[in-house]
């Protein structure tokens, strides 16, 4: 993923990697000797895709036929890409145009600016796509070495969801796929320094938007891996729903007072290296909403929470999880994420059931007002136009 920015060679030398390399590498994995490998998946009745996040890069396909052939092709392209200088130079133009398009998206810029305020000295503060300068700096040697460092069988997981004979599939892969030899490169983790416990002034942006936006972000403790981190994610999500959610203590009041609108939302992320929560909304009264939200956070420790509300949200989480099991694509994504925690996806149901009301109440103390970060985005002031001539 985008956070993996260093590796160490056999001599112990550390090699930093440019921002955006993981995303660029994802694109170049599809380049084969006879062109883009996507056409071969299409020929065998499969849809193939890929995406890069901070913590991982994922390659996937969906198909109803030729499962072994498509799975073998997926594994082969991941471990045996065919990089060429000409292909890399062509891809630079594609990625740079993508960066320019996102630069025109005010909401993307808001998110990046907010992450920079939380993790200023860490790759989390940088765009997953990288910058125009970092993409231009990429070359064939850098890509090959990064691929050798990270695209190793022991770092990868293969997930197949569907009505498949697992034994026949694995045997087919063993017969077809040639795995790479062990690499001498090792990863150098990038630690995240704790955020200074001090209040920071709100960030102000002027953008091409119609209504002011307000975003609040909290850094959170990701906790230990496994069931504990997964349980903490569901406990913290429940706490935010109890307090700041649409059935929580403040939502209707803020809505009635015109401080927020129905664009209001909450996003909570938990990964092995970091965790954070974001509350975002459009607001016709951004200054008043900022004050109201900070007052709500300040009162959090003494805020009365009802167990009946907790039990309702817990049932909602269980119901949402069970309903999502109908989606094979969702199962595939969740299987990868939970495997990184040493869990099987169906273990999550027991984890949700294990979340207690007392645990949710204790988590209120993890939300530190001094570490709260705020961003306010306002519509650009239009210059008055002169008279027509």
Image (cartoon, grey):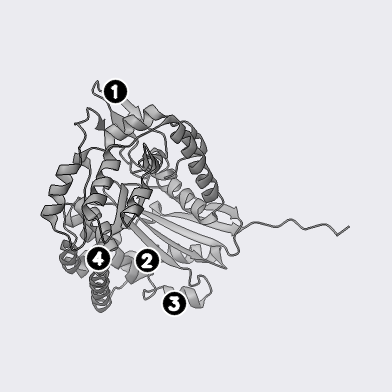
Secondary structure under badge 1? loop
Query: Which residue is rendered at x = 32% and y = 39% of the image?
Result: 4
Residue matched to label 4? 360
Quarter containing the C terminus: bottom right
Name the residue tied to disc 2: 299
Residue occupying the point 48% across, 68% down: 263
The x and y percentages for residue 220 are 32, 53
User: In the rendering, which numbered label is found on residue 13?
Assistant: 1
Q: Residues within 10 Å of mark 1 (few under 14, many from 20)?
A: few
In-image side of 227 versus 123 (left or right): left
Q: In this rendering, would 113 be left or right of 152?
A: right
Identity of the residue furthest to the left in this view: 167
Instruction: Name the N-terminal-most of marks 2 and 3.
Output: 3
Q: Mark 2 falls on what kind of element?
A: loop
Where does label 3 land, which residue?
A: 252
Q: Earlier in the sequence, mark 4 or mark 3?
A: 3
């Amino acid at each position: 993923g985008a956070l993996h920015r260093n590796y160490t060679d056999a001599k112990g030398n550390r090699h930093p990697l440019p921002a955006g390399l993981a995303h660029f590498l994802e694109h170049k994995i599809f380049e084969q000797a006879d062109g883009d490998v996507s056409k071969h998946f299409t020929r065998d009745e499969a849809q193939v895709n890929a995406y890069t996040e901070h913590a991982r890069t994922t390659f996937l396909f969906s198909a109803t036929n030729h499962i072994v052939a498509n799975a073998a092709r997926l594994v082969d392209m991941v471990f045996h890409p065919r990089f060429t200088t000409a292909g890399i130079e062509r891809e630079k133009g594609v990625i740079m145009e993508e960066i320019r398009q996102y630069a025109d998206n005010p909401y993307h810029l808001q998110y990046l600016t907010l992450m920079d305020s939380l993790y200023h000295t860490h790759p989390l503060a940088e765009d997953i796509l990288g910058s125009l300068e970092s993409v231009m700096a990429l070359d064939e040697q850098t890509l090959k070495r990064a691929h050798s460092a990270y695209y190793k069988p022991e770092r990868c997981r293969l997930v197949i969801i569907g009505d498949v004979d697992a034994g026949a599939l694995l045997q087919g892969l063993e017969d077809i796929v040639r795995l790479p030899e062990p690499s001498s490169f090792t990863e150098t983790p990038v630690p995240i320094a704790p955020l200074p416990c001090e209040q920071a002034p709100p960030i102000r942006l002027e953008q091409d938007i119609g209504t002011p936006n307000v975003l609040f972000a909290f850094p959170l403790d990701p906790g230990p891996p496994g069931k504990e981190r997964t349980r903490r994610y569901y406990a913290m999500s429940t706490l935010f729903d109890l307090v700041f959610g649409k059935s929580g203590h403040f939502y209707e009041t803020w809505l009635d007072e015109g401080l927020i609108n129905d664009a209001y939302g909450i996003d909570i992320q938990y990964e092995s290296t970091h965790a954070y929560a974001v509350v975002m909304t459009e607001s016709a009264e951004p200054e008043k909403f900022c004050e109201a939200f900070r007052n709500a956070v300040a009162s959090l420790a003494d805020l009365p929470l009802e167990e009946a509300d907790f039990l309702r949200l817990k049932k909602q989480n269980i119901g949402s999880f069970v309903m999502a099991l109908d989606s094979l694509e969702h199962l595939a994504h969740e299987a990868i994420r939970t495997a990184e925690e040493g869990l099987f996806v169906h273990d999550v149901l027991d984890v949700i059931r294990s979340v207690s009301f007392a645990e949710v109440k204790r988590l209120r103390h993890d939300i530190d007002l001094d570490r709260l970060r705020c961003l306010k985005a306002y519509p650009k002031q239009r210059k008055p136009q002169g008279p027509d001539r």
